[in-house]
Image (spheres, grey):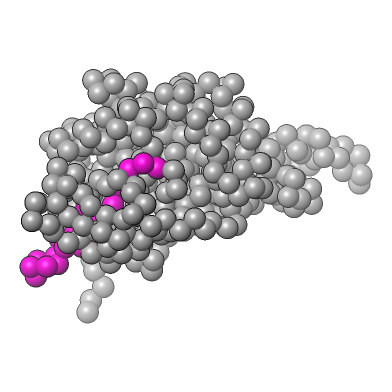
Amino acid sequence: MFLSEELLEEIHRRAPKYDKDNSFPYEDYKALKAAGYYKAFVPKEYGGYGLSLKEIAQEQTRLAKAAPATALGINMHQIIVGVGKYMVRHGNKRGEQLLTDAVNGHLLSFAISEPANDRVLFGSICQANPEEDGGYRFYGPKVFISMSGEATRMVTYGMDDNNGDPQSVFAYIENDPETVQVKPEWDTLGMRGTQSYNLTLEGAYAAKENILTKVAPGPSFDPVVFGIFANFEILLAATYHGLGKRALELGIEHVKKRKSIAQGTTYDQDKNIRWRIAEAALLLDTIPPQINTLADDVENNEDHGNYWMPRLSAIKNYSVEASFKTVEEMVRASGGSSYSNHSELSRLVRDVYAGLFQPSDQESLHDSWASLLLGPIEK
């Protein structure tokens, strides 16, 4: 274990305040940075602690049990570190700057998602305009950008269609307030501590050496595109799994104390409640083996062929749905007290909904599997 139980307990105690205040968890990030978590996933040869993808996923699960919003925010930083690792391992040395910056204490974030763009990673609605020096300037809106008010650098992308041959241009940019206009508005149902503001790129500049890759739009095994996809889906699955595990813990604790007047005993002796607890545990138990296997396969360069992205999408969806169902079962088992805003379970109800909106969603998951198994829909 990398994060100490004492640190996780401190973060857990602060979680209700940040949720209620709808504020960024500065103390959490300060503590995580001091603990070396910004560079935990960075290989030792670059100055980090060398955790594997499987190990950082397990840490994300532990952190999410303590504070889902803090875990989901820092998750984006860890994904970028994972992209840097994957790039370097597959011959793209420009990933080294991501690793070096993480070691030097930079907080990294993504500026990828765009309003109403369900292509997500596979085709931007933002412009990437080439400069004479080989760099690019980026223009357009981005949405749900976690930590965008605090991150110092970001990975973004846009479309270069200036010569009739569209290219997705992925770049590493400074979070410069003159060219990255952050809109500090975040009043959401849950995951409030992520402070995932929308922003507009107004000529955000990336020098030639900060252009990570240029590829045709669409799914790709380019190390940048696949590195983002793989690390995003696996670490998102791990984070939401932690939320589900915490919900199960709360449910178990509660039913052992909750008394039934009719039965004259606590609800842990009620066969229907026991069924709900068991049902949730069974769902959650299927998730870690899938995360661990896929994480190892990414780092060992296993060949899943065209099944790679559908399988990665599947584990994210399975994890979110398992935690969603677990939260529901624990609310049912715990009774009306879980409806109070003072209940931690009430907060988890709100937080788990965020997983439904993060890619890949159920529709794209089923589309990808249907196309793989049955071929594309006939025109």
Relative vertical location of residue 254 with respect to residue 196 in this rendering, above or below: above
Percent of width and height locating residue 319: 47, 46
Judge from the rendering whether residue 303 lies leftward or rightward of residue 228; answer left or right: left
Q: Is residue 8 magenta?
A: no
Relative vertical location of residue 159 with respect to residue 305 in this rendering, above or below: below
Q: Is residue 348 visible?
A: no
Q: Is residue 163 visible?
A: yes
Between 366 and 263, which is closer to the camera in this rendering? Answer: 366
Between 350 and 140, which is closer to the camera in this rendering? Answer: 140
Name the residue located 17 percent from the left edge and 47 percent from the top edge: 207
Judge from the rendering whether residue 280 lies leftward or rightward of residue 222; answer left or right: right
Judge from the rendering whether residue 74 lies leftward or rightward of residue 14; answer left or right: left
Percent of width and height locating residue 68: 55, 41
Residue most extreme to the bottom: 379
Between 60 and 166, which is closer to the camera in this rendering? Answer: 166
Magenta stretch: give its range: 151-170
- Quarter of the picture containing the C terminus is bottom left
Percent of width and height locating residue 328: 64, 52
Name the residue located 57 percent from the left edge and 27 percent from the top edge: 8
Between 6 and 286, which is closer to the camera in this rendering? Answer: 6
Percent of width and height locating residue 277: 66, 41
Using the rendered view, name the quadrant where residue 374 is placed: bottom left
Relative vertical location of residue 338 with respect to residue 84 in this rendering, above or below: below
Residue most extreme to the front: 178
Relative vertical location of residue 266 with respect to residue 315 in this rendering, above or below: above
Q: Is residue 169 magenta?
A: yes
Using the rendered view, name the quadrant where residue 43 is placed: top left
Name the residue located 32 percent from the left edge and 27 percent from the top edge: 103
